[in-house]
Amino acid sequence: MVDADDRLDFEFEDPIPVAPPITKRKKKVIDLDDLLEAHKKEQKKINEKISKQRKIRKVYDMEDEADDAAEARLSECVDKCQKEINQINGDEELRLWGIRVFGENENLPQQDYPELKTSHLLQSLTNQKISSLVELNIEEGETFLDGLLVDGWLLHLVYTSGCVEKIIATWTFNLMLYSPKVLLMEAACEFWCAILSRTNKDDLSSIRIEWLPRYSDLKTALLSYGYLLDSPAKVSTDIDMIQSDSETTGPPQNIRSWMKCAASCCQIRNHTRLFSVREAEELLAVFISFVLDRQLLGLSIVMHEAMLSVIRFFRDEEWLDSCKKVSKSLAYRLPCDINCLRVVESITGTEGRCKQLRSALAFQFLLTCLNKKVCDPEEILQMLISINVKDKTCDLFKIYIYLNLVENWLSFDETLKDKSVLHELWGVCLRNFSCGVTITDLRPYASNVRSKASYLLQGSMRK
């Protein structure tokens, strides 16, 4: 039991704190002087803050100016180094090959052939049962023959009859060279290439052709295409490589068929001679000049095959003289700059005639570049040896051209391989060029000349 005198539990708890009585403060009276003093203090803080910001901004501006000056000096140094590197590499003076071989096209002739209605081939078809099956209308004979040509049936009919009528021959020939319709143009080209190929086979399967094209027909078409290098009076220096925006400028699409047809005409000489030797020389010069027109880059394979066909046209007793004539003609008409190297290097192939033509072209271009009329090989090399490449006025681009031309001339002329005197002189010339142009020479084409001469010198020493 709990004793009555004992204290209760709540009596042992802490006493509840009592808040002290709130004393009322007297409001301080703020007069005008206090407000002015507070304003001055606040304005002083603001001025100090503005002054500090100005100092910080000034420091930043000085740092920015220092950075800009350092960046400008660095940029100037980089530009100077880049310019020196460009001069060493000769990139600024790198020249592109290419001239305009084709100018404005003439209006390609589009002829009507009413005589086709009376052709023996068409008449034979109308007299047969096939005319009732296909309901052939004699008044639409040319349209019907267009379909036969495109589908390849015209060639089969000619093979069956064993004869190509004159009207059929001239009609398909003009379609090949002048038709704006791609299907007709290509079909006519295939027709003629097949006919000429079969004619070249001197056997019983050959067919009779009442009309064959001549060089004058091909030349007329070429001139209508706007060919610019036909006349020597039109010197190549007057022709630039700037292409016009006109749709009538440059080679037409028919130029591919023209090349194929010209090549096929050259291939049938054993059976039928369509070109004279002089005409074949002119045709070869035309094909070689084509390599300078950048618009014909897509036809490089066709051009090369056609060029080989023309080269093989000549008899052995005709070739050497014709090779010299073609080389002189091209060296006279084409520029003696990077374009002449393009022309020389475009003559590729392992055939002896290709090598002879490449060597002859290089030699004639070299004579033209040096303004030499004398063809003595030793005299030419002595002249090159006498050139002082250390002279700052020496045009190293011309030296680069000379190096490449002499290399092609001596390397591909089989008759000069045993002439040790020429090779000794050539070695002296290469040493002069490789040693005379130092590695610190910053002239345009200096590195090209030095590298080329050193490379050729090492090759000559290994032989």
Image (cartoon, rainbow, N blue to C red):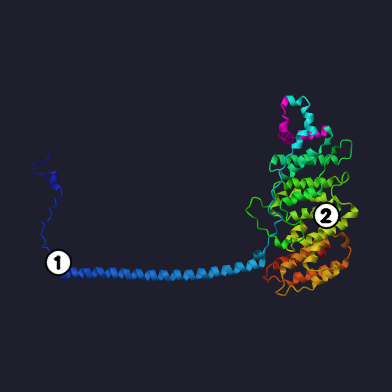
| Quarter of image, res 423 | bottom right
In the depicted structure, whether residue 425 falls above or below residue 124: below
Q: Which of 3 and 351 is in front in this view?
A: 351
Which residue is farthest left?
5
Q: Let me know if residue 239 appears in the view.
A: yes
In the depicted structure, whether residue 183 falls above or below residue 65: above
| Quarter of image, res 342 | bottom right
Disc with the residue nearer the chain's start (1 vs 2): 1
What amino acid is labelled 2 in the image? Glu
Query: What percent of the width, then of the height, locates residue 350?
Result: 83, 53
**Residue 30, labelled with which disc?**
1
- The span from disc 1 to disc 2 (Cα, nearest Å) is 119 Å
Query: What percent of the width, then of the height, locates residue 432?
Result: 77, 71
What amino acid is labelled 1 in the image? Ile
Q: Is residue 142 magenta?
A: yes
Q: What stretch is highlighted in magenta?
A: 133-160
The quarter of the rendered structure image containing the N terminus is top left
